Amino acid sequence: MKKGFSVGLLGGSFNPAHSGHRRMSLEAMRRLKLDEVWWMVSPQNPLKPVAGMASLRARLASARAMARHPRIRVTAIEQELGTQMTVDSIAALKARYPQVRFIWLMGADNLLQFHRWAAWREISRNVPIVVMARPHYAGRSQFAPAMGWLRRFRRNNPAGWRTWHLPAITMVNLGLDPQSATAIRQNDPGWAEQVLKSDILKSDILKLQEQAD
């Protein structure tokens, strides 16, 4: 990756990944002029219960199936880095890829609980933050506890993020797909088994194609 390569980081459980994640990523690439968006599939979000959390393998498979774009990179890089907290993951990524300009992407629902994240002010001092509005959360997110501190650092031009002095945060109202992982789990409790079977089938087909070649 060349110097100045820009990457949007979208972290989460992806339990499972859904169309909202993809739309957020595509819009972020378009509006922020990003080279790539990395989906950081968390081994285990410390703020979410273990019960009901599908395996990392299943969540990665669902993310790969949903991403469907050459510039959306699905990763389990936090497992590789040995980090769990976002503040540590960002520090490790910046150390590993000093030539890359990272920007943190989050849904408005996550902004509501951002004050509960470990060292959230430190996160804000290390990467620009773009909040992508989701239905039912856009208005409420303006009054998120963390905004009591972050509001003074709000910026109005997302496309100019490369020139911002940190901390810096901006809001992007996209009218995003109202799809949610919670609704998917409720409507399809067996989604993890299905996506794993599909992933295994695709892998087998690729192996057969390679053998044929």
Image (spheres, grey):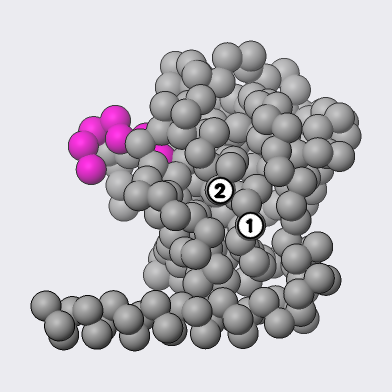
- Quadrant containing the C terminus is bottom left
User: Which residue corresponds to the image point at 18% horizontal and 79% vertical from the top-left?
Assistant: 210
Is 197 on the left-hand or right-hand side of 107? left
Disc 1 marks which amino acid?
A: His
Question: With respect to residue 181, does 8 lie above or below?
Answer: above
| Membership of 52 in magenta stretch | no
User: Which residue corresponds to the image point at 65% horizontal and 48% vertical from the top-left?
Assistant: 20
- Which residue position holds label 1? 18
Q: Tell me where residue 160 appears, x and y as whole percent.
A: 48, 16
Q: Tell me where residue 25 appears, x and y as whole percent.
A: 53, 42
Q: Tell me where residue 177 appears, x and y as whole percent.
A: 71, 43
Is 81 on the left-hand or right-hand side of 57? left
Q: Secondary structure at mark 2?
A: helix
Q: Tell me where residue 61 appears, x and y as whole percent.
A: 50, 72
Viewer-proximal residue among 208 and 154 = 208
- Quadrant containing the N terminus is top left
Is 94 on the left-hand or right-hand side of 58? left
In 3D space, how far apart are the residues under numbered discs 2 and 1 (Cα atoms)? 7 Å
Disc 2 marks which amino acid?
A: Arg
User: Which residue corresponds to the image point at 50% horizontal and 79% vertical from the top-left?
Assistant: 198
Q: Secondary structure at mark 1?
A: loop
Viewer-proximal residue among 181 and 205 = 205
Q: List the single residue furthest toward the left.
A: 213
Magenta-highlighted residues? 1-7
Residue 103 shows up from this direction? no
- Which residue position holds label 2? 22
- Categorize mark 1 by other alpha carbons within 10 Å: few (<14), some (14-19), many (20+): many
Quarter where residue 11 is shown = bottom right
Residue 195 shows up from this direction? yes
Are circles 2 and 1 on residues that touch, CB within 8 Å?
yes
